[in-house]
């Protein structure tokens, strides 16, 4: 599949996840190519959001910039750690890429949305982060987790992205390293 087809299928897959349909897996490919595309889209979106923040509030100090760029790795690390832990602890039969691929596409979409909100001057990163947590809960439920573990999966991803989103709200509540 081409990149455009994969992204379109991912949107359809997420609409199926959010709708509670069990056929959501047919819209994603859980192979190395889809995983790599998810990483590329996420880091392209992260780069765009950093550029948008720099355009909006100016170039921060070099230590702050390094912290900001490193902060973009936290949501991905949280996704990998929480999904791997959930799969191993609960002995889920499906591959862990069922969490990774849709999760990376979701993180990329939320980063693109965050970049747009920064550019228009509306600091909605907190709302975007909360929406991401709700979506991760729906992903956990669709991937076979019970309510409690799916909630823990979503909350872990929410807490990991919190300092990053507070900074991206325009530096008003910046968390320094």
Image (spheres, rainbow, N blue to C red):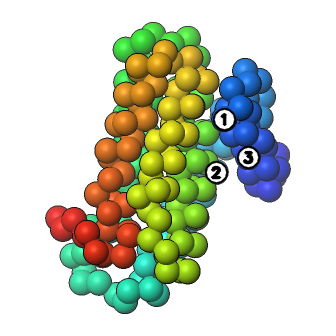
Q: 75 above or below 148? A: below
Could you say where residue 17 lies in the image, as x and y percent from the top left? 67, 32
Q: Which residue is mark 3?
A: 11
| Residue displayed at 45% across by 48% down | 130
| Between 121 and 94, the one nearer to me in the picture | 121
What residue do we see at 25% from left, 69% from top? 173
Mark identifier at residue 72:
none
CA separation in Å, label 3 and label 1? 11 Å
The answer to which of marks 1 and 2 sits earlier in the sequence is 1
Q: Of helix, strand and loop, which one carries label 3? A: helix
Up the image or down, 81 lies above or below 71; here it is above
Residue 13 is situated, as x and y percent measured from the top left of the image, at 73, 37
Residue at 38% from the left image edge and 70% from the top image edge: 169
Residue 11 falls left or right of residue 153:
right
Mark before the other along the chain sequence, 3 or 1: 3
Q: Would you say 124 lies left or right of 10 here? A: left
Q: Residue furthest left?
A: 177
Residue named by callout 2: 37
The location of residue 85, given as percent across then percent down, is: 37, 24
Q: Secondary structure at mark 2?
A: helix
Q: Residue at x 41, y 58 (%)?
A: 126
Indicate the quadrant containing the C terminus: top left, top right, bottom left or bottom right.
Answer: bottom left
* Residue under numbered circle 1: 18
Can residue 6 be seen?
no
The first of marks 3 and 2 along the sequence is 3
């Amino acid at each position: 599949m081409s990149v455009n087809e994969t992204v379109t299928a991912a949107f359809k897959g997420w609409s199926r996840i959010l709708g509670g349909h069990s056929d959501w897996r047919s819209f994603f490919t859980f192979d190395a190519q889809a995983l790599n595309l998810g990483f590329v889209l996420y880091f392209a979106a992260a780069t765009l959001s950093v550029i948008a923040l720099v355009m909006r509030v100016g170039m921060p100090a070099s230590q702050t910039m390094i912290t900001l760029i490193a902060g973009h790795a936290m949501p991905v690390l949280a996704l990998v750690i929480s999904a791997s832990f959930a799969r191993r602890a609960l002995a889920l039969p499906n591959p862990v890429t069922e969490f990774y691929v849709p999760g990376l596409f979701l993180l990329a979409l939320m980063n693109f949305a965050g970049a747009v909100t920064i550019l228009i001057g509306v600091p909605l990163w907190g709302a975007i982060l909360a929406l991401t947590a709700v979506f991760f809960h729906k992903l956990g439920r669709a991937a076979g987790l019970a309510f409690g573990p799916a909630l823990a999966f979503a909350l872990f991803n929410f807490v990991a992205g919190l300092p990053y989103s507070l900074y991206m709200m325009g530096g008003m509540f910046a968390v320094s390293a």
